[in-house]
Amino acid sequence: MTRESKQARIQRMHNEYAILCDVYPAPSCALNFRNPFELLVATMLSAQTTDKQVNKVTGELFDRYPTPKALANADERDVEGIIHSVGFFHTKARRAIALSRALLDDFAGEVPQTMDELTTLPGVGRKTANVVLGNAFGVPGFPVDTHVIRVTGRLRWRSDWRSANPDPVTIEREICAVFDPADWTDLSHRLIFHGRDTCHARNPECAVCPLAGTCPSAGIR
């Protein structure tokens, strides 16, 4: 690919995103939730596992502990038993209880609606906070997970696409600077879906990828 100007890259980004909008016309969060508290806990549990696996355990978890107060007073071993299949269940059970206690102590049992407040909760970083903001409260947020990192790198949507260890916060800021805030949440969803469906980590399906015509990495292994 010849050297691309910043203006040309931004135009390509918007063109490629328009294609993803056609492929995924109605994106939504893959985690099952009924309220902000459930989404907050489910997103925390989803670290280093799949949303599908998390959905298998949260039904029982929230039936038994439906509120921050209930989960804050839960027996840690009982929570571990419910979520043991999601991986790192010892740490996640402890964090689920701790963040529930923090909600009670610091926010009167309500999930806060700002990045600064959310990231004070145990086990909650920018990715989790962005998921909650965008999907529970309609506040623009751009969660950066492994799929977003991979897809934006292969598409060369970001300046550090060569980096083996890119900074998620830098990616968030760079991508968000190019798109309208109203697009951020669905943009993340669509990039994640594309990464799961087509732009796989080990064997990307470039032959059937709708972005192959302009992707700088198409056909490269």
Image (cartoon, rainbow, N blue to C red):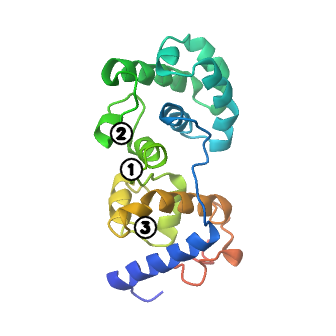
For the point 63% across and 18% down, the residue is 64
Looking at marks 2 and 1 on the same chain, the residue that comes earlier in the sequence is marked by 2
Question: Comparing marks 3 and 2, which lies closer to the viewer?
Answer: 2
Label 2, label 1: how far apart the Cα atoms are: 8 Å
Q: Position of residue 218 (x, y in %)?
A: 59, 78
Residue 113, numbered circle: 2
For the point 35% across and 21% down, the residue is 108
For the point 52% across and 35% down, the residue is 35
The answer to which quarter of the image holds residue 161 is bottom left
Q: Decide: marks 2, 1 in contact (CB < 8 A)?
A: yes
Label 3, label 2: how far apart the Cα atoms are: 35 Å
Q: Residues within 10 Å of mark 1 (few under 14, many from 20)?
A: some
Secondary structure state at the residue bearing disc 1: loop
Looking at marks 3 and 2 on the same chain, the residue that comes earlier in the sequence is marked by 2
Question: Comparing marks 3 and 1, which lies closer to the viewer?
Answer: 1
Q: Measured along the vertical axis of the image, is residue 70 above or below residue 111?
A: above
Q: Position of residue 83 (x, y in %)?
A: 64, 25
In this view, the residue farthest toward the bottom is 2
For the point 55% across and 13% down, the residue is 76
Number of dots carrying numbers: 3
Front residue of 173/189: it is 189
Q: Amino acid at mark 3?
A: Arg
Left or right for 75, reference 160: right
Q: Amino acid at mark 2?
A: Gln
Residue 176, numbered circle: none
Q: Which residue is mark 3?
A: 162
Q: Which residue is mark 1?
A: 139
Q: Amino acid at mark 1?
A: Val
Secondary structure state at the residue bearing disc 3: loop
